[in-house]
Image (cartoon, rainbow, N blue to C red):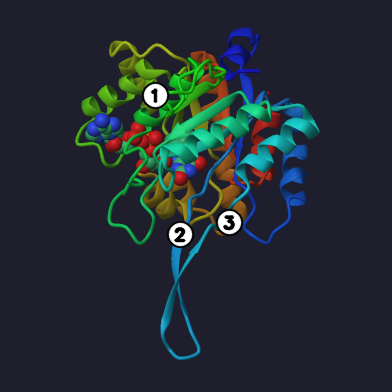
Amino acid sequence: MRVIEHIQKAERTLFTIEILPPKKGENIETLFSHVESLLEFEPSFIDVTYHREEYIYREQTDGSYKKIVTRKRPGTVGICASIQNRYNIDTVPHLICGGFSKEDTENMLIELDFLGIENVLVLRGDPIKSEPGFVAHPEGHCYASEMIKQVADMNRGVYLDAELQDATPTNFCIGAAGYPEKHFESPNINTDFQHLKKKVELGAEFIVTQMFFNNQAYFDFVRRCREHDINVPIIPGLKPMATMNHLTLLPQFFHLDIPEALSLEVAKCKDNKEVKEVGIEWCVQQCKELIEFGVPVLHFYTMSRSELVKRVAKEVF
Ligand code: FAD
C-alpha cells in the first residue's frame, strides 16, 4: 500500500522505522531480528536507506596506492523485497541522485515496480568523502526535485525514451526530505522552503524530516510549510540519543541543534548506560508531545538497532 493511503486510513498515530542495509559481508539475519523485535508495534512501513559508492585508496605491496570503488552497504532493493515478502510490511526504499544516471534510476524504478514496491523516498544524497561538495552523475540529477519529476513522469507512463509508446505507468508514492533546522547548504530557511515546495509541486506526496531533538523546531517547520502552501503530511523523524559522543556527532553529521536541557542531562551521566536512559526519556516526552500535536506518524531512525526504539515505543504506543 502507498504511504499516503496508510496515513489516510490511520485511526491512530502510526509507528514506522528506518533501517540501514548491513555492511558488506555481514548477514541479514541480525537486521531481521531487529525488525522482528519491533513487530509488536505494527510498523506501517519500513524505510531502507541507500548508500552510494565510496572511493578508498588501498596500499599495494610496491608502496603505491590503488583507488578502489566500493559500496559499504549494498542491498537496499533486496532488503525491501524480502521484508515485504517475509512480514507483509510495505517498504520505502531510498533513492539517491548521487552516482545514478537517469537511465540507472529508470531501471531501478522498473525493478521496484516489478517487485511490488509502491513507495520511494527521493533524495539527492550527500557528497562522498573525496568530494568537496555534491557532484552529480554526468547524466544524472543535481537535485532531488529533478529525480522526483522523473518518478512522477513514470507514474504518467512517460519514460526516458520518448519513442516508447504505451509504456505502463508506475504508481509510486513519492516522499521527500525536509529539514526543520534548515538544510546545511541552503543560504537561508526561506530559500529552503522554496526548494521544498518545488519537490511537492513536482510530485512528492509526503515529507519525512531530518531528526530533531527540539519539538518546537518541528512545530515551526510545519507552520511555515503551511504558510508556504506545502500541505502534504510531514512525518517527524526521531532518534533516542544513545552515547555521549552523540552530543558532538549528531550536530556534525546531521546539522542539528541539541537543546541545552538535553546536553546538560547527558553531561551529568557517568556512562553510556545512563545516557541511554536520558535519551529514552527525552524521546518519550518528544513523542507524547508530537502525538498531542496530531502528527500522522512517528518515524524512528533505528540505525538498525532496535533496543532503544523498542523501549520508547513501549511507553508511547
Ligand atoms: P535536495 O532537496 O536536492 O536539496 C539539497 C540542497 O540543495 C538544499 O540545500 C536545497 O535547499 C538546495 N536546492 C534544492 N533545489 C535547488 C535548486 N533548484 N537550486 C539551488 N539549490 C537547490 N542520504 C543518503 O545518501 N541515503 C539515504 O538513504 C538518505 N536518507 C535520508 C532520509 C531522510 C529522511 C533525510 C532527511 C535525509 C536522508 N539522506 C540520505 C541525506 C540526504 O541525502 C542529504 O541531506 C542531502 O544533503 C540532501 O538531500 P535532499 O534530498 O534534501 O536534497
Q: Is residue 78 visible?
A: yes
- Structural crowding at the residue carrying mark 1, measured as other residues with C-alpha within 10 Å and reported as few (<14), some (14–19) or many (≥20): some
Taking the view exactly as shown, the residue that stands out farthest to the bottom is 62
Can you tell which mark lies on residue 18? none
Horizontal relation, residue 115 to residue 303: left or right: right
Tell me the amino acid under the disc marked 1.
Lys
Q: Which residue is mark 1?
A: 149
Indicate the quadrant of ligand 1 in the picture: top left
Q: Is residue 256 visible?
A: no
Residue 294 in picture, x, y percent from top left = 52, 13
Horizontal relation, residue 24 to residue 163: left or right: right
Q: Which residue is mark 2?
A: 54
- Compared to residue 251, the image places residue 68 above or below, namely below
First in sequence: mark 3 vs mark 2? 2
Residue 247 in picture, x, y percent from top left = 43, 51
- Structural crowding at the residue carrying mark 2, measured as other residues with C-alpha within 10 Å and reported as few (<14), some (14–19) or many (≥20): some
Tell me the amino acid under the disc marked 2.
Glu
Quadrant the N terminus occupies: top right
How far apart in space, not on screen, are marks 2 and 1 (Cα)? 27 Å
Residue 101 in picture, x, y percent from top left = 42, 42
Question: Residues at badges 3 and 2 in contact (C-beta under 8 Å)?
Answer: no
Horizontal relation, residue 313 to residue 189: left or right: right
Report the front residue among 138 and 86.
138
How far apart in space, not on screen, are marks 3 and 2 (Cα)? 31 Å
